[in-house]
Image (cartoon, rainbow, N blue to C red):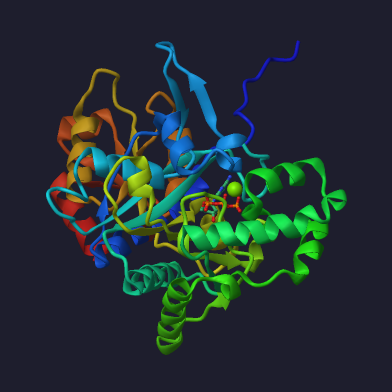
Amino acid sequence: MKKNIIKSIKGFKDILPDEIKYYRFFEETIGKISSQFAAEELRLPLIEKSELFHRSIGDGTDIVNKEMYDFTDKGGASICLRPEGTASVVRAAIEHNLIYDRGLKKQKYWYYGPMFRHEKPQKGRYRQFSQFGVEYFGFSDTNSDIELLMMGNLLLKELNIENAKLHINSLGDMEDKKKYEKIIFDHLSMHKDNLDEYQKDTLEKNPLRLLDSKSDNVKEILLNIPMLYETLSVTSKNRFDILMGKLDSLKINYILDNSIVRGLDYYNDTVFEWRHESLGSQNAICAGGRYDNLVNTIGGDDVPAIGFAMGVERIIEILKSEDNFEIEKNTSIGIINISSENEVYPHLISKDLRSEFSDINFYNTDSSASLTSQLKHAIKINDKFAIIITDDNIKNKNLTIKASENQMADMLISLEDLIKYMRNKHE
Ligand code: ATP
Ligand code: MG
């Protein structure tokens, strides 16, 4: 009879040891870069009240409408697995008075962790994925936009990711956004017959979202609409011109891209996205923008803010495809134990070795197996060196080692001499 094997859920991925080195490298790098920019880390719950995202991301968006893992818990509360980090950071910042406490505190935060969205799983798109995100509170001028963009660029550089392209746009203020929404709505309404049901629905709920539609029919209809930039108010345009001027002076490459509108309601003015063409259609690796009204929407005071979120799986995909990625591996040494069952000496030896050599991986082989099979295993781990502990060793308070310069022949040695020997070899 075939066994009924339980498998993981679609869109939820196991990360196996082979991939861990890329994640470690990524995690080390974000820690380093964040502190270079004086951003502090926040670790927040994976579950929040559903209302938090209804209020912030918006009811007309895909994330809230279709992709939320929301449910009623046993106490009847309406809760969800967080689909993104920004709203939670804002929630926590208000709750703990991190940004407003009898005056505005200017703060910079970062987070890293899993997010959940019920999307169609495919390459670069999972139902559980990780984001690294940065949020700046209290900074309103273009210098904070520039600082954040520089941080993103430096991070990509430190990760050795080349060829990422920065696309930017400005949504203007809420008025500008509404004005442009109407332009799109009016324009597409004239061509309703060419839209499918889903597109018609989006047109009603969130017309801006159709700007970054991948469907040819929508792209074609929108070909002749004015650029968002052209419709901005004088103040918004002025702000965006200053920003682009600074990017030019700083020689930061960017593409002014009218299709960048972001899928979330809370953005205003600057919006941006880094893309990496090697990834195919899921090519956005990091995205963000300014959200000056969100703190207020969630219940706090008026605090300007800007942030981004980086998709970790897509970054890891790029790291994996680059063959120059090599992390120095720690030396591994097998410790073979063929002493009697009630002996503890091998544990004491292992403990001493581990505290003496913190960067060596000691692998205790299976002590219930024969010497031959343990030795075979130890040689697989390290074909030049292995440590053996027998009953005789215990009696004589020494160890047996096999070293390749000795053709793996046995050698007796005291623990102190072994430590001296290994220290010499190790340096
Ligand atoms: P997309 O257009 O790819 O759906 P998005 O606009 O929904 O992205 P954001 O909410 O801005 O994405 O999230 C920021 C980043 O997180 C994205 O640029 C992407 O790298 C990553 N990301 C978003 N959704 C997923 C997912 N389902 N699986 C893996 N990574 C994701
Ligand atoms: Mg999405």
Is 288 positioned to the left or the right of 227 in the image? left
309 or 141, which is in the foreground? 141
Residue ID at (14%, 54%): 103
Is 337 positioned to the left or the right of 122 in the image? left
Can the viewer see residue 193 in this picture? yes
Can the viewer see residue 386 in this picture? no
Residue ID at (43%, 13%): 76
Image coords of residue 12 (percent x, y):
57, 35
> Measured along the vertical axis of the image, is residue 127 above or below residue 105?
above
On the image, which quarter does residue 187 sit in?
bottom right
Residue ID at (87%, 49%): 193
Image coords of residue 238 (percent x, y):
44, 78
Residue ID at (45%, 30%): 50
> Measured along the vertical axis of the image, is residue 26 above or below residue 48?
below
Image coords of residue 75 (percent x, y):
40, 11
Total marks placed: 0
Quarter of the picture holding the C terminus: bottom left
Is 384 positioned to the left or the right of 237 in the image? left
